[in-house]
Image (cartoon, helix red, strand yellow):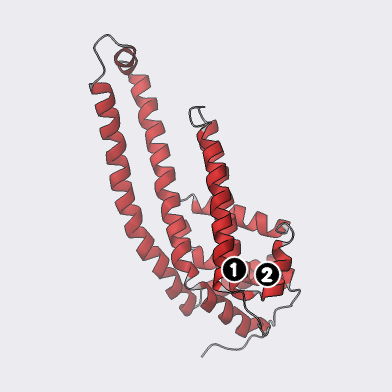
Amino acid sequence: MTEVFSLALKDFFTKKFLKFSLVPLILSFFLFVILAYFAFNFLFEYFDALFANAEEGSFLAWLYSFAIFQFILALLGIMSASFLVVFASVFFAILVVSFLTPFICKEINAKYYQHELKDEVSFFKALFKMLVIFVKFLLLFGCACLLYLVPFVNLFVFYLVFYYLFHKLLILDVASSMLNDNEFKAFYAKSSPLEFKLSTLVFYLISSVPLAGLFLQVFFVIFLTHLFYQKVLGLKANLSPIKEH
């Protein structure tokens, strides 16, 4: 894992990959700003309308008269909106990077591994796998919604559900770009190795930091590409790689 991290970091800070990183960062940043503006405006207007229309002397009006309740309500609203805005932007960045992933994988392969790829995974097979992931995600999301009204547990549960989607999409993105059809089937015939789960968990935590997850999506793909070559295909990196032209 140390070697993989070192190689990925070295590759990420090359001119070509830094340019790649600007694409999801710039596009997702604009989405981030737009979502933040509308999400926070919607929440504040919703709460204002909700309590403004409460009848005088009602439980809602009485509850809203306490400053501590107004503070807790505002805090929960900001936390929920921030969570949705940050991760909506991150998943949009994953979508943008997915168009760059085949080029990233080919570049890493040509530079370090020279692995010949035959019988590539078809677009429709990868698409079907993605649809299965989204169906499972929606089922988990539905279960999480049942716990929405439970304080603190709600955010924790949603955090886990979105990690499932984050992990699955990242792994599928790289696996479908660098494995052949048989290797792809063999990989998905069993659970992802622990190294992959730990890696995507760390990436997910990093992505919780606004903008960090947008800029580092290319690094995540580079890291997972090296990890696939070394841990799944059992190849060793040529540490005297072919120089970039």
Say whether residue 179 is left or right of residue 46: right
Rendered image quadrant of residue 70: top left
Is 82 left or right of 62, judged from the image as shown? right
Q: How many marks?
A: 2
- Helix or strand or loop: what does disc 1 sit on? helix
Disc 2, disc 1: CB below 8 Å? yes
Q: Is residue 18 above or below residue 160?
A: below
Task: Give the residue at mark 1.
Answer: 125
Give me the C-alpha separation between circle 2 and circle 1: 10 Å
Residue at left 27%, top 40%? 41
Expressed as whole percent of the image width and height from the top left, the position of residue 100 reads 48, 73
> Is residue 238 visible in this depiction of the protein?
yes
Report the quarter where the N terminus lies.
Answer: bottom right
In terms of depth relative to the viewer, which is nearer, 112 or 44?
44
Few, some or many C-alpha atoms within 10 Å of disc 2 (few <14, some 14-19, many ≥20)?
Answer: some
Instruction: Say which residue appears at 70% left-offset and 79% top-offset.
Output: 237
Vertical position of residue 18 compared to residue 107: above or below: above
Residue type, numbered disc 2? Phe
Which element carries disc 2, helix, strand or loop?
helix
* Residue carrying label 2: 184
| Relative side of 91 to 177, left or right | left
The picture places residue 59, in percent across and down from the top left corner, at 34, 12
Residue 196 x, y percent position in the rendering: 67, 59
Find residue 123 and report its horizontal and vertical position in percent.
54, 72
Residue beneath the point at 32% across and 16% down: 60
Of labels 2 and 1, earlier in sequence is 1
Closer to the observer: label 2 or label 1? 1
Amino acid identity at mark 1: Lys
Residue drawn at x 54%, y 58% as measured from the top left: 131
Dividing the picture into quadrants, the one containing residue 47 is top left
Q: Residues within 10 Å of mark 1 (few under 14, many from 20)?
A: few
